[in-house]
Amino acid sequence: MKIIQWIYTLYSGLIFIILMLVLGLFVVIPLLVSQKGGRISFIFIRLWSSIWSFLSGIRYEIHGREYIDIKQPYIYIFNHRSFVDAPIIPIAIKQEVRAIGKKELSRIPIFGFITSRVAVWVDRKDTESRKKSVERLLNILEKGISIVVAPEGTRNNTEQNLLPFQKGAFRIAVETGIPIMPMAVIGAEKIMRRGSILLKPGIIKVYFSSPIDPKPFQYEEGYFDLRDKCFNRLEAMILTHE
């Protein structure tokens, strides 16, 4: 069984690399030509993710898209349990988005170059890096582009539903007044289990809820209360649908 899973994982990895090489330039070029080229780039990012998922036997069930106004920017927050969370984002979210990523990923040849155009890299151990990433995210939101944040700050390798939330995304929400859109990802950790690089086919379910308005929390240190509300909402979504 392990041998079959290794073969499947190598096959899936090869498909991912081939698609990256074929579609990578179509992701990069529109953004090099114009800052407004992101919409075109995301067409090819979704194509990359969709073809890879289909050929790898990974299927998605998306629930709650009716809560999303595609003309409204959001701060999407999600539970980060697996490395396969990355291709879920462009498939589930039908908006142009920018995501926060670990700086180490930017050093991966070719992949880092391509994703650097649509990601905000941050060194979580470096205070100055975190400060600059917040400034970039604010600039992105000002342009009407949504951002995606894993507020746990790292991949959850524990048995807990969620790790404690970092405060950055909620400070941004309070400062800008941009609503937070909770996004519960269910089943990704079964596709790639904790502590393993092996993949297997399966179904990933994504649930959105009604957006959370940060305006009532625009008082001194109100972002702590907003953080707690978002934590409770996302945890309830996970418990309801798992």
Image (cartoon, helix red, strand yellow):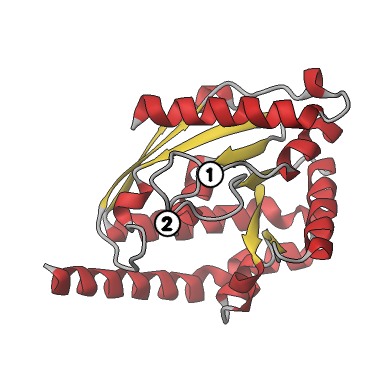
Image quadrant where residue 40 sits: bottom right
Type of residue at label 1?
Leu
The answer to whether residue 63 is visible is no
- Judged by depth in the image, the label closer to the viewer, 1 or 2, is 1
In this rendering, position of residue 32 left or right of residue 65: right
Mark 2 neighbour density, 10 Å: few (under 14) some (14–19) many (20 or more): some
The answer to whether residue 184 is visible is yes
In this rendering, position of residue 208 left or right of residue 146: left
Q: Position of residue 140 (x, y in %)?
A: 79, 48
Q: Position of residue 81 (x, y in %)?
A: 44, 50
Residue tagged by mark 1? 163
In this rendering, position of residue 77 left or right of residue 214: left
Q: Residue at x 49, y 30 (%)?
A: 235
Residue tagged by mark 2? 84
Q: Quadrant of the C terminus?
A: top left
Mark 1 neighbour density, 10 Å: few (under 14) some (14–19) many (20 or more): some
Q: Residue at x 21, y 74 (%)?
A: 7
Nearer to the camera, 54 or 165: 165
Residue extending farthest to the left is: 1
Q: Are marks 1 and 2 in contact (CB under 8 Å)?
A: no
Q: Determine which of the numbered discs, if any, sits on residue 71 in the image.
A: none
Q: Position of residue 209 (x, y in %)?
A: 53, 24
Q: Residue at x 66, y 69 (%)?
A: 103
Image quadrant where residue 45 sits: bottom right
Residue extending farthest to the bottom is: 109
Residue extending farthest to the right is: 220
Image quadrant where residue 167 sits: top right
Q: Position of residue 42 (x, y in %)?
A: 60, 53
Secondary structure beneath dot 2 equals: loop
Type of residue at label 2?
Val
Q: Quadrant of the N terminus?
A: bottom left
Secondary structure beneath dot 1 equals: loop
